[in-house]
Image (cartoon, grey):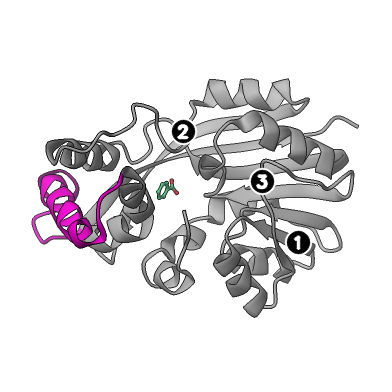
Amino acid sequence: MAWDPQAYAAHAAFVPALGNAAFELLGAVAGERVLDLGCGDGVLTSRIAAEGAEVVGIDADPAMVAAAVEKGVNARLGDGRRLTFAGEFDAVFSNAALHWMGDPAPVVAGVFRALKPGGRFVGEFGGHGNIAAIRVAVRAVLAARGYRVPAAEENYYPTAPEYRVALEAGGFVVDGCWIVPRPTPIASGMAAWLQTFRGGFIDAIGVPAAERAQVIEDTRAMLRPILADGAGNWTADYVRLRFAAHKPE
Ligand code: BEZ
């Protein structure tokens, strides 16, 4: 799906802001070379660079790459499933991006190739059960309106054992792999969240532009008793998969 950097900055600033645990787990060291895989608009990439690391950001969305470059990030367009780097990074970092890349095998293989011996792969993304209530509600609303929703999920949300197997199959030694439930306050409200993060999915199902707002409103109404409190404050049912692994020497 295509991203709108302005909408992302307005409604999704919590994504890099809540990337602190992954950032700390990376523990970037001055002088080392780091690849930020799925760097988005470069907010966390800039933080890694501020530690003194030499960071390259890569993202599949041209508008997000442009937004990162505007922040002074060395960012480039690229597909995480077809990385072409070879033995040049001390670490590969990724926050809230791997779930968009699907099958982990080509991603893990490309990261492994990109790292120097001993290099680390550290990050966080959506884990098993991520935004489950939201996903079910979007599907239920679309089905009720007569749309055929594919049975397969559009994002990759593995369990910790599943991702550990994927990392090990790619040659990594796994230092840790955890599921971390992270209920996440959504300050902009559920309609803005759905517009930002599920708009592409709703379009891809074939919903005409004129009907999109009603799909979002019906989904918001279905979720209200589940994810909003009495005062109307929304909390999304995020679940993170956090991991640290390294390439053997
Ligand atoms: C996330 O887990 O970061 C996420 C997944 C899908 C849509 C929005 C956010």
The segment highlighted magenta reads 206-233
- Element carrying mark 3: loop
Could you say which is closer to the camera, residue 168 or residue 67? 67
Measured in 3D between alpha carbons, the distance from the residue under mark 2 to the one under mark 3, in whole angstroms, is 16 Å
Mark 3 or 1: the one toward you: 3
Q: Which mark is residue 191?
A: none
Left or right of residue 89: residue 189: left
Q: Is residue 12 above or below residue 152?
A: below
Among numbered discs 3 and 1, the one appearing first in the sequence? 1
Residue located beneath label 3 in the image: 80
Residue located beneath label 1 in the image: 56
Quarter of the view holding residue 13: bottom left
Q: Residues within 10 Å of mark 2 (few under 14, many from 20)?
A: many
Q: Quadrant of the C terminus?
A: top right
Residue 152 seen: yes
Q: Are marks 3 and 1 in contact (CB under 8 Å)?
A: no
Q: What residue is drawn where x is 20% and y is 55%? A: 216
**What's the amino acid at mark 3?**
Gly
Left or right of residue 238: residue 91: right
Could you say which is closer to the camera, residue 62 or residue 125? 62
Measured in 3D between alpha carbons, the distance from the residue under mark 3 to the one under mark 1, in whole angstroms, is 13 Å
Q: What residue is drawn where x is 81% and y is 46%? A: 84
Task: Based on the picture, tell me whether residue 227 belongs to the magenta stretch.
Answer: yes
Left or right of residue 54: residue 72: left
Residue located beneath label 2 in the image: 157
- Element carrying mark 2: loop
x and y percentages locating residue 12 in the rendered image:
41, 63
**What's the amino acid at mark 2?**
Tyr
Q: Residues within 10 Å of mark 1 (few under 14, many from 20)?
A: many
Q: Are marks 2 and 3 in contact (CB under 8 Å)?
A: no
The answer as to whether callout 2 falls within 8 Å of ligand 1 is yes
Among numbered discs 1 and 2, the one appearing first in the sequence? 1
